[in-house]
Amino acid sequence: MEMEQTVTYLVLIPLMPLVGALVIGLLHMFTCTTRPLSERLYGILGVTGPVIATILAVKTFFELKGMPEEGRYFSQKVFTWFNVGELDVAMGFLADPLSVLMLLFVTFIGTLIHFYSIGYMAGDENFGKFFAYLNLFLGSMLILVLADGPVVMFVGWEGVGLCSYLLISFYSKERDNVLAGNKAFIVNRIGDLGFILGMSLLFWAIGSGGFDYLSLRENASALAPGMGLAICLLLFVGATGKSAQIPLYVWLPDAMAGPTPVSALIHAATMVTAGVYMVARFSFLYVQAPLAGAVVAWVGILTALLAAIFGMFQKDIKKVLAYSTVSQLGYMFAGVGVAAYSAGIFHVFTHAFFKALLFLGAGSVICALHHQQDIWKMGGLKAKMPTTYWTMLIGCLALAGCPLLSGFFSKDEILYMALANGYPGVWLVGVLVAAMTAYYTFRMFFLVFHGSARDEEAYAHAKESPKVMTVPLVILAIGAVFAGYLNLPAIFGGHQQVTHWLAGSLVEHHPHASLGLELLAIAASIAAFAIGAFIAYRKFGQGAEEPEFQGFAKFAYNLFYVDQFYHAVIVRPYKAFGAAIQRTLEPYVTDGHVKLSSLLYQLIGQAFKVFQVGYVRIYAIYMVIGLSLMSLFLSQTLN
């Protein structure tokens, strides 16, 4: 029998970074034009909230771990937010196995990124504002993760959307950066419409029994099949926006316009994982709508393929990593789509370590080369930056799916579950993408660190980053190696602790596939890694000259001209339609109200103008008439 446990400190986990954002923001606002505060003070304030949130997350984990598996969750109702008809929504938080797993790596990796940012952003004129935004970003993600229902989740959902806009366009003096922020904001609003519609349908269908996750899960069986399918697909539209899947993936590569720590936070621990988390959180709906699951799986794996193609031809180091994130998110959606929710979430967990490591490592390289980001203008940095080299090598091995590193275990589990659950097509595409991932990952790595320097001047001044930047790299590298062992499958002698931990939060069925099928999946994953890495080594291991792309390579380098297509088919007609509406309706509707008000006052003025004659005796008569009318009115009223 489940027994609810109420605690009083859950609200402090998101509140700590939110308070930090408020304090830092106010200090920056009131001191930036007079006497700016020291970066040291801003740095201390910036990391304090995330550190406290991490400590509280660990406390929550151990307290939850000590509870019986049945009914393993904490909750806290902070206040009643609103009550309209049958909709009763509290600002409440829920800590169950799923949210706590997310909580652990979001706070931990978010804190490391905050420490790294102290070194990366040193000397920036908006140092304080950056940490205010970064704290706000982390606090919003923690609200999303800890929310006890979809309405509170949507608060965090919109919060991370706002922060992505603020941080992507942080260097707002450059027009392209502002446009990148606008693009992220607008594309995510398209996805959010789907989320809102799905949430509204969900409430209309079963929300009267309670609109928190626990109540919805209990009443999910009352959903009609068609209604359940519609809700799942609409919610997934929201996920395609937030987690950059086809057709709404176009904003994420442009998000590289922000500072590199922002890229690490977006790609590893906050915004883009929100969509996968949301689908897993609603696993009790998706298991009842297998067609919706199939849509999620195929959209995910095709997104993984498309992004891998793009990643093979990019030359901006951050864009290579950005497309790898889109591709890895595709794997995660393939996992939750084939009803292997724990496998999808486990890949979210391992990916957070090696992707944060790779982005922060890329930031270390970019700083050393005076903000050069073109991999064809790098080379030979192994000797100059040994800590960055070895930690990035670990990150690349994990991303590429090297056996015995974290990415191998989590990605292999998704592919195996796709095969075992009857999705051989998803598995086959996934294996192909694994080989492509190994290729473009090591293409980037060899061009950056091996061969000879292509920009002699930048290379001459390159040196290893300070410890405030390299220590987080070492910690993340350790996680990139060992995080996969937390869910080691039985074939490797493990007990899949993460899968068992998540069992209380997710609704999934584990197939009993043959040993041969599992060995086939493992062998295919190893072969894919070996083939992709070997081809990359042969082409780029000793350095290479930048090629001139032709044919398909040029087409892929230009991202299949998807942005141009969207602009021609959607943006330009929409702007033309808006301009036509403005020309047609504005003179009569918008301006018409203003002109009508002006005309009305003119008419009133003209009417009273006849009484203004300029003689005192006439005004005295007006006063006598007015007083007489008032006296008459009062006498009638009193009687």
Image (cartoon, grey):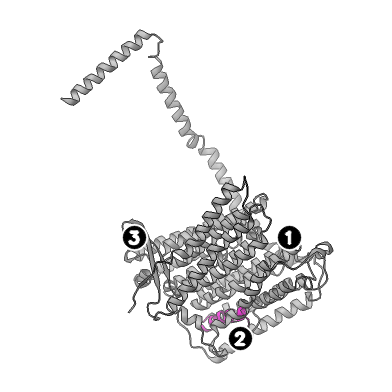
Q: Secondary structure at mark 2?
A: helix
In the rendered view, does 49 fall on the left or right side of 82?
A: right
Q: Earlier in the sequence, mark 1 or mark 3?
A: 3
Vertical relation: 511 (above or below) 287: below
Q: For the residue marked with disc 3, what is the amino acid?
A: Asp
Instruction: Report the front residue among 637 and 112.
Output: 112
Percent of width and height locating residue 506: 44, 76
Q: Residues within 10 Å of mark 2 (few under 14, many from 20)?
A: some
Q: Is residue 191 in sight in this rendering? A: no
Residue at the image position 82 percent from the left and 66 percent from the top:
454
**CA separation in Å, label 2 and label 1:** 40 Å
For the magenta stretch, what is the residue range? Answer: 404-422
Q: Earlier in the sequence, mark 2 or mark 1?
A: 1
Q: Quadrant of residue 244?
A: bottom right
Given contact means CB atoms under 8 Å apart, are the residues at marks 2 and 1 in contact? no
Q: Which residue is mark 2?
A: 522
Q: Is residue 480 in sight in this rendering? A: yes
Vertical relation: 381 (above or below) 67: above
Instruction: Report the front residue among 250 and 537.
Output: 537
Q: Secondary structure at mark 1?
A: loop
Q: Which SS type dominates the magenta stretch?
A: helix
Q: Which residue is mark 1?
A: 371
Q: Which residue is mark 3?
A: 88
Could you say which disc has been placed on residue 621 in the image? none
Q: Which mark is in front, 3 or 2?
A: 3
